[in-house]
Image (cartoon, helix red, strand yellow):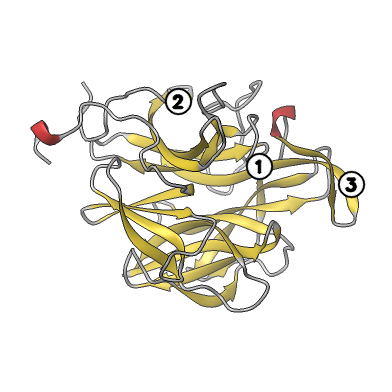
Amino acid sequence: MPDAARPRTYTNPVYPHYFADPFVLRHGDGYYAYGTSGRPHESGRVFEVLHSRDLLHWTPLGGALEPLGGENARDYWAPEVAFHAGEFYMYYSAGVGDKSHQLRVAVSGRPEGPFRDAGVILTPEDPFTIDASPFQDEDGEWYLYYARDFLDGERVGTALAVDRLEGMTRLAGEPRTVLRATADWQIFRRSREMYGATYDWYTLEGPFVVRRGGRYYCFYSGGAWEEPNYGVSYAVADHPLGPWTEPQADGPTLLRSVPGQVVGPGHNSVVTGPDGRDYLVYHAWDPQKTARRMCIDAIEWTPDGPRVDGPSFTPRPPPALRQS
């Protein structure tokens, strides 16, 4: 795009329609975004796909995933896509409402799909698994981060785990805990009835891992996804399997609600923009909570970890312009 045609600023959200749990894949000459739409596309496929060259102007490409048959897969959440050996692998969960979600994988020869399920449940021993996020380390090893339920410990609830991918459609079956809830702000719901008992339920979800400066950073969202306490924090490790440590803070360290402007910013991915900077891609509610929409803000990597000047809701310099 010629400099004269590039916008001098952008303002969140960068896509005006409902687009939750946004994941952005940089591939070829642009970017592909995949999100939870809450409804099937007119094509009958689930998960909308968007394309952009600058992270700001997005063109809908249609539905991505051919739906599964059966009564146990009516709701589809949080797609993320990995490219490996000429194929695109979509990791997602399917269930009914907020019950019985299980991680699955679908395959396509094109980033926009259609993706077709591989017929594999990746975590068959778990009653509830969501938010699968693939990560390839510099040595070529693949890992899958995800959220699962924990019924032991001081803060019962959904938290983060990781396992090695022995193939793009098969886990090693050696899951390790990444993070458990450690703070009051991570509460999802008091006195929640789950698994035949009542718990004060805490939630960590939406893991996303990047390697920067020789260390591994796991971004995650915590709290109740519909409420102001929902936000983004992170942990750091020297190996993809951990152990992980997180900064102590009174609330989310990277993104949190802004009263009267932004509610519940979260479920992020990280992508390198056309200017070479890293950007946090996330969804956020408007103050009236009419929809969760896709937003972006630049990440600054400091000696003390990542920093994000967001969630932003006023004009910012766009990714297409190099920063001085």
Which residue in the structure is indicated by mark 3? 198
Front residue of 136/128: it is: 128
Front residue of 51/123: it is: 51
Residue 196, compared with residue 247, is above or below; it is below
User: Can residue 237 be spotted in the picture?
Assistant: no
Q: Alpha-carbon distance for marks 2 and 3?
A: 36 Å
**Dot 3 amino acid type:** Thr
The image quadrant that residue 45 belongs to is bottom left
**Dot 2 amino acid type:** Gly
Task: Name the mark nearer the viewer: 1 or 3.
Answer: 3
Which residue in the structure is indicated by mark 2? 310
Name which residue lies at 74% across and 63% down.
Answer: 127
Task: Name the mark nearer the viewer: 1 or 2.
Answer: 2
Helix, strand or loop at mark 2: loop
Classed neighbour count for the residue bearing mark 1: other residues with Cα under 10 Å, few (<14), some (14–19), many (≥20):
many
Q: Left or right? Give the position of 157 relative to 75.
A: right
Helix, strand or loop at mark 1: strand
Front residue of 222/240: it is: 222
Residues under numbered marks 1 and 3 in contact, where contact means CB atoms less than 8 Å apart: no
Specify which label sits upstream in the sequence, 1 or 2.
Answer: 1
| Residue 50 x/y as whole percent | 34, 54
Residues under numbered marks 2 and 3 in contact, where contact means CB atoms less than 8 Å apart: no
Specify which label sits upstream in the sequence, 2 or 3.
Answer: 3
Specify which label sits upstream in the sequence, 1 or 3.
Answer: 3
Q: Quadrant of the N terminus?
A: top left
Front residue of 253/258: it is: 258
| Residue 266 x/y as whole percent | 54, 38
Residues under numbered marks 1 and 2 in contact, where contact means CB atoms less than 8 Å apart: no
Name which residue lies at 51% across and 33% down.
Answer: 286
